[in-house]
Amino acid sequence: MKMCVITAMLFLVLPGQCGILAGKVNKHKPWIETSYHGVIIENMDTVMLDPPLVALDKDAPVPYAGEICAFKIHGLEAPFEAEVLNRTSGEGVLRARGPIDCEQQKEYTFIIQAYDCGATPSGANWKKSHKAVVHIQVDDVNEFSPVFREPLYHATVTEGKIYDSILQVEAWDQDCSPQYSQICNYEIVTQDTPFAIDRNGNIRNTERLSYDKQQHYKIMVTAYDCGQKRAMESVSVHIDVKPVCKPGWQGWNKRVDYEPGTGSKQLFSKMHLETCDGPLSSVRAMVELQTSHIGKGCDRETYSEKSLQKLCGAASGSTDLLPAPSASTNWTASLLTDNGRDSDLIFRFDGRQAANIPEWVVPQNLTDQFTIATWMKHGPSPGLRAEKETLLCNSDKTEMNRHHYSLYVHNCRLVFLLRRDFIQLDSFRPAEFHWRLEQVRSPRGTLLAKGNGEPR
Ligand SMILES: *[C@@H]1O[C@H](CO)[C@@H](O)[C@H](O)[C@H]1NC(C)=O
Ligand SMILES: *[C@@H]1O[C@H](CO)[C@@H](O)[C@H](O)[C@H]1NC(C)=O
Ligand SMILES: *[C@@H]1O[C@H](CO)[C@@H](O)[C@H](O)[C@H]1NC(C)=O
């Protein structure tokens, strides 16, 4: 069998190709260009060479010597191989030996040489061309999508301001070429936000933000590379709105509601001084209290007695000692009055007349707790050494004329006298209470008095 093959080869070679037998000569070495420039798309295997890879041999058409048998690449690291496509024409092709990754290496440079087929079928006496330089550039494929450098972005803005840039987000892309690795555009994915983003990733607000309206925004942002590949995952951007700092006292209300008779109340328990981190040399505070609505205060000149008792929180069941005169209450009928109506009547006393209040009206025993409320304007005291000016007096019926209790003005004091156990004739045990009041020294006007005892 082996013998047969050899015979066949001899037969094939012998007839037309006498030159071999004649010369067995390989005069010329193959010729190729001095340099080639190639482009390969990453992950493909064919290299497009310019000029095309062709080796010529002057020995053509001499068999073997004029044919090209191989292209050899020098440089072990170059992941390329060259193959002869047509021995006669010398055409060859350059291919990648494995996947070419642009992200790892963008360019390759190596040496290539062409070999002819020698002088004999066995390839002996082959000749090689000069060394040509091959330069290959790897073309990028847009394999990678943009990725944000941070997993989350966060910024704080002050309300009411328009920012050129609140913060900048940044994405990057692993592709090797500028076109596919650069970020060409950013986009806010979240609908209807008061924010915009530019090509450089700068986020700005499109309207003034209000702390009262919204204190926190969460928006999603995506990025596109210059090959229009969009980021696989959008990034979250958190923006906090902080109130603009206004220096001054904070944490207090202008209005404080107080119900009469409910004891003490802290007015500014949560107040603090906001300095906005500014320098502080001294603090001076002045507190001024006003009854904001006059009807809520004890305004005795505007309101009727009944209203006042209600407004000022008097206990129910109080006794009006100077009611408007009527059939059942006639002890005030002879007094001088102003033109007020009903319970608004103001009585005038000049020290000579008085109202004799029937026994059944007056509580004889004030008990342990009582309130006497009076409203009066006090004129100048008569005489040099002022006498007692009695507003209210409860006394024995006859003879002893002892005061059980009485309220009077003496000089510049308001005095209340109380004898608790007036029934026991031999013990008085009086108690006197003196108030030195500005109102008692009232310089003008006549003495007007109106009082009520209010047993509780
Ligand atoms: C090889 O090239 C020669 C010369 O150009 C041509 O005549 C021949 O047809 C080619 N062979 C093939 C298989 O293309
Ligand atoms: C008040 O009325 C009583 C009886 O209702 C009568 O006795 C008295 O005189 C009257 N006093 C005056 C000042 O009108
Ligand atoms: C006053 O009233 C209280 C209770 O109603 C009683 O305990 C006390 O004895 C009375 N005092 C006089 C002097 O009547």
Image: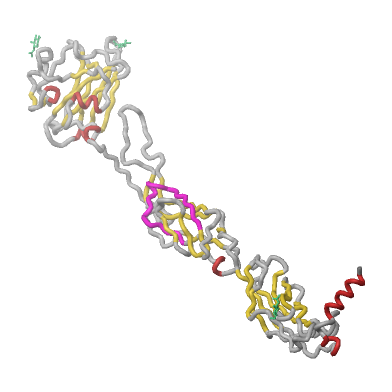
Q: Quadrant of ligand 1?
A: bottom right
- Position of 328 with respect to 7 (left or right) is left
- Image quarter hosting the C terminus: top left
Q: Out of 104 and 37, give the one closest to the viewer.
A: 37
Q: Out of 401 and 196, give the one closest to the viewer.
A: 196
Q: Which residues are magenta?
A: 202-222
Asked whether the viewer can see residue 349, the reply is no
Can you give x and y, in whole percent of width and height, for residue 303 in the image? 18, 29
- Position of 277 with respect to 391 (left or right) is right
* Residue at 14% from the left image edge and 25% from the top image edge: 344
Q: Measured along the vertical axis of the image, is residue 273 above or below residue 339?
A: below
Can you give x and y, in whole percent of width and height, for residue 138 in the image? 63, 71
Q: Measured along the vertical axis of the image, is residue 443 above or below residue 190?
A: above
Can you give x and y, in whole percent of width and height, for residue 370 in the image? 28, 20
* Residue at 69% from the left image edge and 77% from the top image edge: 109
- Image quarter hosting the N terminus: bottom right
Q: Measured along the vertical axis of the image, is residue 30 above or below residue 367?
A: below
Is residue 204 magenta-colored? Answer: yes
* Residue at 7% from the left image edge and 27% from the top image edge: 339
- Position of 438 with respect to 232 (left or right) is left
Asked whether the viewer can see residue 435, the reply is yes
Q: Quadrant of residue 116?
A: bottom right
* Residue at 45% from the left image edge and 48% from the top image edge: 216
Is residue 150 magenta-colored? Answer: no
